[in-house]
Image (tube, helix red, strand yellow):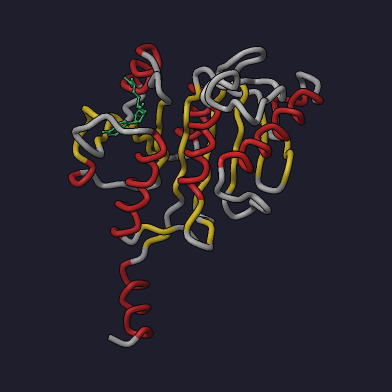
Amino acid sequence: MKISDFHSTFLKFRRDVMREFIFKANKTITSSDINLKDLPGSCGRLDLLCRCVSDAFFLSHDIRRDVIFYAVLYGQPNPPVCIKFVGSELRKVSPDERNIAIFIKKALKKFEELYEEERKSWNQSTPGIYVKRLGFRDLILEKLNEGKNIYYLHKDGKDVENVDIENPVFILGDHIGIGEEDEKFLEEIGAKKISLSPLELHANHCITIIHNVLDKRGLYGV
Ligand SMILES: C[S@@+](CC[C@H](N)C(=O)[O-])C[C@H]1O[C@@H](n2cnc3c(N)ncnc32)[C@H](O)[C@@H]1O
C-alpha cells in the first residue's frame, strides 16, 4: 500500500476526539517546597503524578496535542489544588519525571503568589500549565456541564473492548485509589466504570493503554 493510500484510509476512519484525564493525587504536596530528590516520599508520590503527565502527552519525538490532563492535589499544606496541562500549548516540557516536577513546582509557586479570590480562576504558570483552587468533584461536575462523558477506570469495571467511548473524560486514582466517597459520587452521576485488565495496574500504565485503545479506534483530536 502506498503511503498516500494509507493516509486516506486512516483519515476515513479518524474521528476528532479530545482525550481528557482527571487524576486524584491524594497525598501530593500543595506547596512549592518540592524536594526534587525525593518525589515519592516528602512530595507525596509526586513521582507517580509526573509519570502520568509523561504518559499522557509524550510520543516518540512528538506530543499529543489532543490531550488535557488535570491533577487534583490533596496533600498538605493547602489542598485542594488543581493543575491543568493542555497538550496543544505545552512548551519546553520533556518526558522525564524531574523536568515535569520542576514545572509542577512552578505551578504551585504561582498558586502561592495569588490571593484566594484570584485562585478561583485558571492562572497560567508556564505555557500550557494552569492552576486553580478546584476540588475533584467540582471539576467532574464542570466536565459534565460541558457535555463530556465520564469514564471511571477501575479493575472491576466493564471490559473496555465492549465500551463505546465518546467525548471522554477518564478518571484515575493514585496508589490509594479515589476513595469510597468519591466512588459513590461517580456512581450517582452515572459515570461508566471501565476495566483495562483483570490485574491492578499503575495509573500511568492505564493512561498508556487507554491511548492505545483510542489510537487503534482512530479516535484522535484535532
Ligand atoms: C494502583 S491503582 C489503585 C489501587 C488502589 N489500591 C485502589 O484500590 O484503588 C491506580 C488507579 O489505576 C486505575 N486502575 C488500576 N488498575 C486498573 C484496571 N485494571 N483497569 C482500569 N483501571 C485501573 C484506577 O483508576 C486506580 O485508581
Q: Quadrant of residue 65?
A: bottom right
**In what quadrant does ligand 1 lie?**
top left
Number of numbered discs:
0
Closest to the observer, 37 or 151: 37
Q: Quadrant of residue 218?
A: bottom left
Q: Horizontal and vertical percent for residue 172?
A: 40, 31
Closest to the observer, 142 or 208: 208
Question: Is 107 positioned to the left or the right of 71 in the image?
Answer: right
Q: Residue at x 69, y 21 (%)?
A: 31
Question: Is 48 positioned to the left or the right of 187 in the image?
Answer: right
Question: Is 53 positioned to the left or the right of 176 in the image?
Answer: right
Q: Horizontal and vertical percent for residue 148?
A: 43, 40
Instruction: Decide: is 2 above or below 152.
Output: below
Closest to the observer, 28 or 65: 28
Instruction: Decide: is 92 above or below 21.
Output: below
Q: Residue furthest front?
A: 37
Q: Residue furthest bottom?
A: 2
Q: Residue at x 55, y 18 (%)?
A: 74
Q: Horizontal and vertical percent for residue 16?
A: 42, 59
Which quadrant, please, contains the N terminus? bottom left
Q: Residue at x 56, y 45 (%)?
A: 96
Q: Residue at x 24, y 35 (%)?
A: 195
Q: Horizontal and vertical percent for residue 13?
A: 31, 67
